[in-house]
Amino acid sequence: MENSGCGQECFDVIVVGAGIMGSSTAYQTAKRGHKTLLLEQFDFLHHRGSSHGESRTIRATYSVDYYCRMVLESYTLWEQAESEIGYKVYFKAPQFDMGPADGDSLRALISSCRNNSLPHHVLDSRQVAQKFSGRIRIPEDWVGVLTEHGGVIKPTKAVSMFQTLALQNGAVLRDNVEVKDIKRSSDGGGGVVVFTSNGERFRGKKCVVTVGAWMKKLLKTVSGRELPIQPLETTACYWRIKEGHESDYAIGGGDFPTFASYGNPLIYGTPSLEFPGLIKIAVHGGYTCDPDKRPWGPGLSLAELKEWIEGRFSGLVDPTGPVATQLCMYSLTPDEDFVIDFLGGEFEKDVVIGGGFSGHGFKMAPVVGRILADLVLTEEAKGVDLKYFRASRFEENPKGNNKDLGVQVGNLSDH
């Protein structure tokens, strides 16, 4: 134990990890008037984790109900933050999900739309071709689900937005500060001491840990607890749209959607936005990795993805190969559900953890930040059932939450 020294400089909340989740949390705690410190082990806005890049999908369609409700709240919170900062990070588009008509996950997704009163249209292959004027085609034994709740988030810009808003609300931001350990204070007044690799110590009443792919390593050091959060390296691919058809697949100019394909492989994509004439289409998945010893490529085989592109886009997207790629990491749990909980043990409720976002959490960053802030400040979170996100679920069942789906694709990547 260490003396917290809170009679001197002591923060109300120390947030460890300044990716999208940590930055959103720091914004929330600072906005509520609490003295907040946000720490990042690398440069702010670095490209070594899960919060960088040019686009993430936002969609409300899931095969389980609890994420739909969180995404719907996030839409409002994204727009609220945009109004405070004065620029846009969220660009609206429809969302189109497709897959075999008899697939368990797609049927569960349709059921979730109904349970959450989410307006949607189920389309057969002929209706899909008609709706998108031949730009998207699906096999005859597939169906599509179209909703208006889609869109694209600009990730690096979004992280910068939350960091700027946190700063404007009085937070202290420090980068290139690697946290090596967190200990309980010994002065009897509660609180924690955060230790860094450069010898600095920061004292706080409460702490939130949101270190992404480094979560498993840090938590084992801090508490001896080993959570099944596995880092994966994944590749986002950009494909060339045939000349003369670029606007047909662009966001904003028409009705082309963000999309997900619930077959094998699991595929997702966004309209052309960040790179003119290119469309992002990628496979959900990747290779396990050590975040400190990454392979940096080459990624998954693209043979099935090339075949999928050739069959879906009427020859208007060149399936020969991607013309650009970007690497990123997931932090995958066995059930691909989040971990949002108190660390417990000697820390009791003074340390809150948020991790294991499994490639599909970015869109929900505003609501996750709100929940983590609620937990660290009030010890409870309103409007969300946290039983699905408890760390203890892996002690009861190493596979985590039981979903009873043939394929777990409701948690398809945002990347």
Image (cartoon, grey):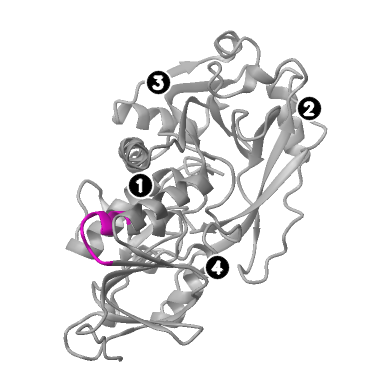
Reading the chain from its start, which is encountered first: label 3 or label 2?
3
Mark 4 or 3, closer to the camera: 4
Examine the rendering and report whether any part of residue 27 can be seen: yes
Residue for badge 2 = 318
Residue for badge 3 = 120
Q: Position of residue 227 (x, y in %)?
A: 44, 70
Mark 2 or 1, closer to the camera: 1
Reading the chain from its start, which is encountered first: label 4 or label 3?
4
Residue for badge 4 = 42
Boundaries of the magenta span: 27-35
Q: Is residue 346 magenta?
A: no
* Mark 1 to mark 3 CA distance (whole Å): 24 Å
State which quarter of the image contains the N terminus.
bottom left
Task: Indicate which disc residue 332 carries.
Answer: none
Reading the chain from its start, which is encountered first: label 2 or label 1?
2
- Three-letter residue code for mark 1: Pro
* Mark 4 to mark 1 CA distance (whole Å): 22 Å
State which quarter of the image contains the C terminus.
top right
Residue 306 falls in image quadrant: top right
- Three-letter residue code for mark 4: Phe
Residue for badge 1 = 366
* Mark 4 to mark 3 CA distance (whole Å): 42 Å
- Three-letter residue code for mark 3: His
Mark 1 or 3, closer to the camera: 1
**Left or right of 402 in this view: 248:** right
Reading the chain from its start, which is encountered first: label 4 or label 1?
4
In the picture shown, does residue 253 fall above or below 61? above
